[in-house]
Image (spheres, grey):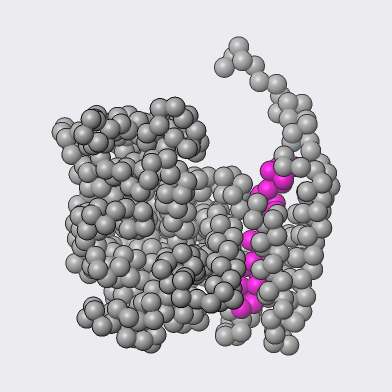
C-alpha cells in the first residue's frame, strides 16, 4: 500500500541529511522533558526515530486513506446549512477523525497541552505529505498555526482552555483577516471590537474569503482603537463558533473544494483579547501569516508531487509511435524539468523551515530568563546569531512561498500537457491538481506581494552574506566548476543591485521579480551543492540546475542594469489610455 513518506525518496533524503538532531535539542530543551512526559525522547536519535514514526504514520494515512477519498471530496464540497453552520464533505470529516486519532493535530504544540513538540521542519514535511493526498484537507490540517499563535501570545488561562482541544483534534481554527473591501491591505480593516462596562470584548463586522471560517475557534483581527485608522489600531481577538457568528455564504471556487471558504458576519460576538491591544497586525498577525506562507509552500509541493506522479505513470504506460511517450525527447524533458523543479522548491521550503526553527530557538534563548545566566560574550554571540536567523527567515519565507507556488502551477500545467486530452478530462486527477494549484500563488499574499517582501532582504545584503558563507566552505574537487559558476552569478547580482540602488525604490519594485528570481536560483544552486556532498544523483541534479540557471541569471542581471523604465514611463502608450466613460 502507498506511503507518501517512505516511498518519496527525496523527502526521505532530506529527512536523513538535514540536521534534525540539532533541531531536536532545540525543541526538547536538551531533552529535559523525558523526565516529565513518557513519550518525550531521551536523546537525539530517539527524537529522530520519533519524527520518522510520526511521518510514516502521516504518510500511510495520506497514501492509503486521504488520497483515496480526494476525488469524492472534490465533487461533494461543503454545505451551508439553514442555521448558518457548515457541514464538511464526508471525506474531510473522516480524514480529520483519522488524523485526530493518530494524534497528529498538535504537531508543534508543547507536550503539556498534548502536542507532539515537533520542529517546524517536520511539520512542513507532514503538510506536504497531506497535501499530496488532498490539497483541500491541508487547508484545515495546516491551520495548526492558529494554536501556535495562541501558545505564543495568549494568556496561560486561554492556553489551558483551548490548546488541549487543538492537540486532540476536537477543535480546528481559522485566521480571520480578509474583508470585502480590504484584501491584501490589512491596515484597511474595518471590523471593530469594543469593550462593555465590565471589560468584556465583542466583535462586529464582516470578513470574507476565510479559509475554514466554520472552525470552532476563530482568531479575528479587528479595530479596537477608534482614533487610529492604520495598523496600530488593530488587535487580535479569539472567539468561538456560536449563535453570534453567522456564515453568510460559501464561496464557489475553482479548486480546493473540500476546504470551506466563508463569508462571516459577527454580530456582537463575545471574544477575548490575545496578547496586548494595538499589536494585532504587528507582530501577531504577521507571525501568523509567515507561518501560513510556509504552509502554502508545503501545500504547493504536495500538489506538484501528486501531479508529477500522475504524469510520470502515464508517460511510462502510454504508447505512441511504437514507444512509451516517456521515451520521446519532448516529453522526457518535461518530466526532468518537473522533477528538478519540485526538488528545488522542496530544498528551499525545507531550508526555510529549518531557519525558522533556529530563529525561534535563538529568540527564546536570548529573551527568556536563561539569558541572565550567560556571560557577556556568549550572550553577544547568541544575539548576533538571533539577528542573522531573523533576517534569513524574513527573506526566505516569502521566497519559498513565491518559488514553490509558481513551481506548483507550472508543474500542474506541464502534467496536464503530458497527458494531453486525457489530462483535461475528469478521468484523471490532473485536472483537479491543476485547479487546486491555481490558488497557491494567490492566497496568503500573492506572488507579487511575496516579491515585495523578499526583494528587500536580497537588496539589503542578507542573501549576499549567505552566499559568501557558502563560498567559504570547503567543496569537493568535482563540484569546483559549479561553485565557480555560482560565484559568478553572485558577483553579477551584486553589480545589478548597485545599479538598482542608484535608481531608487520604484526601480527596485519594477525589477523586484527579476531580483528575487536571481536570488532563488542562487540559493537553490547552493542548496543542491550541499545535497550533492551526500549523493551522486544529487550531483547530477546540481549540475543540471546550476548550468541551466546560469544564463537565466546573466540575462536577468543584464535587464536589471539596462535602466529600462518603459513599464512606468510608457505605460499608457503601450497598453492604451484607460477610458473612464466606457468603464
Q: Is residue 79 visible?
A: no
Q: Position of residue 302 (x, y in %)?
A: 43, 62
Q: Is residue 82 above or below residue 406?
A: above
Q: Position of residue 360 (x, y in %)?
A: 46, 65
Which of the 4 quarters of the picture holds residue 368? Answer: bottom left
Relative horizontal placement of residue 383, taking residue 177 as reference (left or right):
right
Relative horizontal placement of residue 112, taking residue 321 as reference (left or right):
left
Query: Does the magenta segment cover residue 322?
Result: no
Q: Which residue shows up at 23% across the image and 36% down it?
A: 200
Q: Which residue shows up at 29% across the image and 53% down it?
A: 155
Number of numbered discs overlaid on the protein picture:
0
Q: Which of these two is toward me, 21 or 435?
A: 21
Q: Which residues are magenta?
A: 507-530
Q: Position of residue 21 (x, y in %)?
A: 44, 82
In the rendered image, which quarter contains the C terminus?
A: top right
Q: Which residue shows up at 46% across the image and 71% down it?
A: 372
Q: Is residue 152 above or below residue 7?
A: above
Which of the 4 quarters of the picture holds residue 540? Answer: bottom right
Query: Does the magenta segment cover residue 509?
Result: yes
Relative horizontal placement of residue 55, taking residue 480 as reference (left or right):
left
Amino acid at each position: 500500500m502507498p506511503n507518501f513518506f517512505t516511498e518519496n525518496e527525496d523527502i526521505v533524503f532530506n529527512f536523513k541529511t538535514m540536521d534534525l538532531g540539532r533541531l531536536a535539542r532545540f525543541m526538547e530543551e536538551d531533552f529535559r522533558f523525558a523526565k516529565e512526559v513518557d513519550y518525550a525522547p531521551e536523546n537525539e536519535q530517539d527524537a529522530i526515530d520519533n519524527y520518522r514514526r510520526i511521518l510514516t504514520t502521516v504518510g500511510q494515512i495520506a497514501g492509503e486513506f486521504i488520497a483515496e477519498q480526494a476525488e469524492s471530496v472534490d465533487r461533494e464540497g461543503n454545505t451551508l446549512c439553514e442555521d448558518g453552520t457548515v457541514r464538511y464533505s464526508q471525506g474531510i470529516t473522516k480524514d480529520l477523525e483519522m488524523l485526530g486519532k493518530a494524534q497528529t493535530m498538535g504537531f508543534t504544540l508543547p507536550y503539556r497541552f498534548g502536542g507532539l513538540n515537533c520542529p517546524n521542519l517536520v511539520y512542513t514535511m507532514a503538510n506536504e505529505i497531506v497535501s499530496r493526498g488532498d490539497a483541500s484537507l491541508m487547508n484545515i490540517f495546516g491551520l495548526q498555526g492558529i494554536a501556535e499563535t495562541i501558545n505564543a501570545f495568549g494568556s496561560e488561562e486561554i492556553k489551558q482552555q483551548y490548546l488541549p482541544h487543538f492537540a486532540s483534534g476536537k477543535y480546528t481554527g481559522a485566521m480571520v483577516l480578509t474583508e470585502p473591501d480590504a484584501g491584501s491591505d490589512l491596515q484597511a480593516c474595518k471590523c471593530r471590537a469594543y469593550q462593555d462596562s465590565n471589560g468584556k470584548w465583542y466583535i462586529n463586522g464582516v470578513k470574507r474569503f476565510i479559509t475554514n471560517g466554520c472552525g470552532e475557534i476563530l482568531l479575528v483581527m479587528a479595530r479596537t482603537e477608534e482614533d487610529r485608522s492604520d495598523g496600530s489600531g488593530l488587535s487580535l481577538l479569539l472567539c468561538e463558533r456560536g449563535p453570534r457568528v453567522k456564515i453568510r455564504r460559501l464561496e464557489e471556487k475553482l479548486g480546493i473544494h473540500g476546504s470551506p471558504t466563508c463569508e462571516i458576519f459577527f454580530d456582537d460576538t463575545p471574544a477575548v483579547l490575545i496578547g496586548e491591544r494595538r499589536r494585532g497586525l504587528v507582530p501577531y498577525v504577521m507571525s501568523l501569516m509567515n507561518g501560513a506562507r510556509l504552509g502554502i509552500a508545503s501545500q504547493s509541493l504536495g500538489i506538484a508531487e501528486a501531479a508529477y506522479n500522475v504524469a510520470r505513470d502515464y508517460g511510462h504506460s502510454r504508447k505512441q509511435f511504437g514507444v512509451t511517450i516517456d521515451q520521446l525527447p519532448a516529453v522526457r524533458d518535461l518530466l526532468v524539468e518537473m522533477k528538478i523543479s519540485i526538488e528545488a522548491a522542496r530544498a528551499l521550503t525545507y531550508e526555510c523551515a529549518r531557519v525558522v526553527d533556529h530563529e525561534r530557538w535563538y529568540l527564546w534563548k536570548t529573551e527568556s530568563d536563561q539569558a541572565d545566566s550567560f556571560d557577556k560574550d556568549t550572550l553577544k554571540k547568541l544575539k548576533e546569531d538571533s539577528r542573522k536567523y531573523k533576517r534569513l527567515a524574513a527573506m526566505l519565507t516569502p521566497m519559498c512561498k513565491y518559488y514553490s507556488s509558481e513551481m506548483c502551477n507550472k508543474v500542474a500545467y506541464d502534467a496536464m500537457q503530458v497527458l494531453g486530452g486525457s489530462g483535461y478530462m475528469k478521468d484523471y486527477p490532473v485536472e483537479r491538481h491543476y485547479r487546486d494549484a491555481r490558488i497557491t500563488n494567490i492566497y496568503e499574499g500573492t506572488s507579487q506581494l511575496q516579491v515585495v517582501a523578499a526583494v528587500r532582504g536580497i537588496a539589503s545584503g542578507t542573501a549576499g552574506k549567505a552566499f559568501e558563507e557558502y563560498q567559504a566552505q570547503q567543496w569537493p574537487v568535482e563540484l569546483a566548476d559549479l561553485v565557480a559558476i555560482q560565484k559568478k552569478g553572485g558577483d553579477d547580482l551584486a553589480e545589478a543591485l548597485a545599479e538598482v540602488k542608484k535608481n531608487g525604490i520604484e526601480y527596485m519594485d519594477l525589477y523586484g521579480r527579476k531580483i528575487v528570481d536571481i536570488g532563488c536560483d542562487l540559493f537553490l544552486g547552493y542548496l543542491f551543492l550541499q545535497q550533492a556532498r551526500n549523493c551522486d544523483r544529487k550531483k547530477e541534479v546540481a549540475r543540471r540546475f546550476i548550468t541551466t540557471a546560469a544564463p537565466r541569471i546573466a540575462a536577468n542581471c543584464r535587464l536589471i542594469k539596462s535602466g529600462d523604465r518603459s513599464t512606468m514611463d510608457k505605460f499608457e502608450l503601450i497598453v492604451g489610455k484607460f477610458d473612464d466613460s466606457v468603464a
